[in-house]
Amino acid sequence: MLQHAIDSIEQNPDGIEHFMRTLSHREKVEYIKAKFEGYDWSLVELDIEVTHSSPYQTRQIPDVHRRFEKSVLKSLDTSVKRQHIVMETEYGPNDWVSPMFFKGKTQTLKTGETVDRLDSEGDIVVRKLCDLVVLNSYLRVHAWWQEYCPKMEQFRAEFTTQDEYFSLVDLCDAFEFIKITRRSQRYMVFVFRMNGKLYYVQALVSMQGLSLSGYFFPVALFRLLTRAFGLAWLRWFSIYVDDVTIKGPTTIRTDNRGLIFVAFCDAVCLPISPKTILPLEVSTEVSALG
């Protein structure tokens, strides 16, 4: 009887939204997790195919600046714990090896001054970047993926006159949420030098710098949201690459939709950036995208 009632609710987009509003955050997360029982996660894995027999192995090895050394070690340790990378001592003859470098993240103060962004321990927050220019030159973007990466004009057209209030969610290292297939891993080996020592990184996920990442991430997110909510979510959220805009006709409904998206992120282990302050702020405009 209860399942029949839920099935009936889920056939109505407004019914799903109202039903989710009656749940606590924990209940929302459990409800969404249940939607993924038996899900084929290979549908959101990125497969990299290169029709080129000779692997590229870079001779350009970036050096990490001394002021970033501690931060780089912390960043790598976090990525290893998340099972995003594996640290290697060498690479194979068939591996494609590309340069990896690190850039400090910054933030702009209310005074307009730009300063280093620091973590809770006072260390500079760094971003992993990969020079994949050579690999990207051999990759092909499937034409249908481009449907999920609309031009700005198309993105704006997703908003109706009923959408008067908005929240913006910035995802944390969104592309690293996408796992790559096992056969693709040989294309994603990286090297850098720090304090005179060579470091080799085997990526298990998509990385910033891979041209396919920006196209495939919206595809994967579309599939996961549709699995969780059917197509009802198209009335609640709009995706632009890795930024998600929550939209609604009132502050209350927009806030409720924001809570649904946060629960979805927790359910599928999609981290939200620390820059996104929870609970989400609802306003009449979105001032940052892309």
Image (spheres, grey):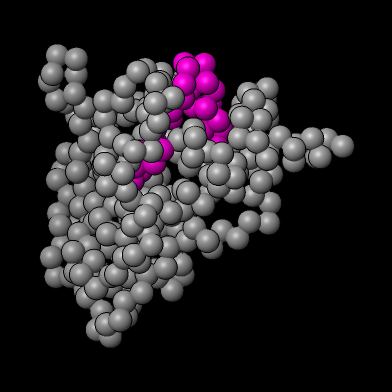
Q: Quadrant of residue 273?
A: top left
Q: Is 9 a magenta residue?
A: no
Query: Looking at the image, which residue sits at the far bottom?
Result: 53
* Left or right: 196, with 219 as reference point: left
Where does the magenta region start and end? Answer: 238-264
247 above or below 52?
above
Residue pushed farthest right? 1
Relative to residue 149, is residue 288 depicted above or below? above
For residue 86, side relative to residue 54 (left or right): right
Furthest residue in direction front, as rendered: 161
Q: Quadrant of residue 33?
A: top right
Q: Nearer the viewer, residue 35 or 208?
A: 35
Q: Residue at horizontal 49%, vertical 39%?
A: 234
Q: Nearer the viewer, residue 275 or 212?
A: 212
**Point 87% across, 37% down: residue:** 1
Residue 102 vs residue 152, the one in the foreground: 152
x and y percent of residue 180 in the render?
43, 63
Query: Please, is residue 103 above or below residue 145 in the view?
Result: above
Could one spot residue 125 in this view of the protein?
A: no
Across and down, in percent, residue 171 comes to 39, 38
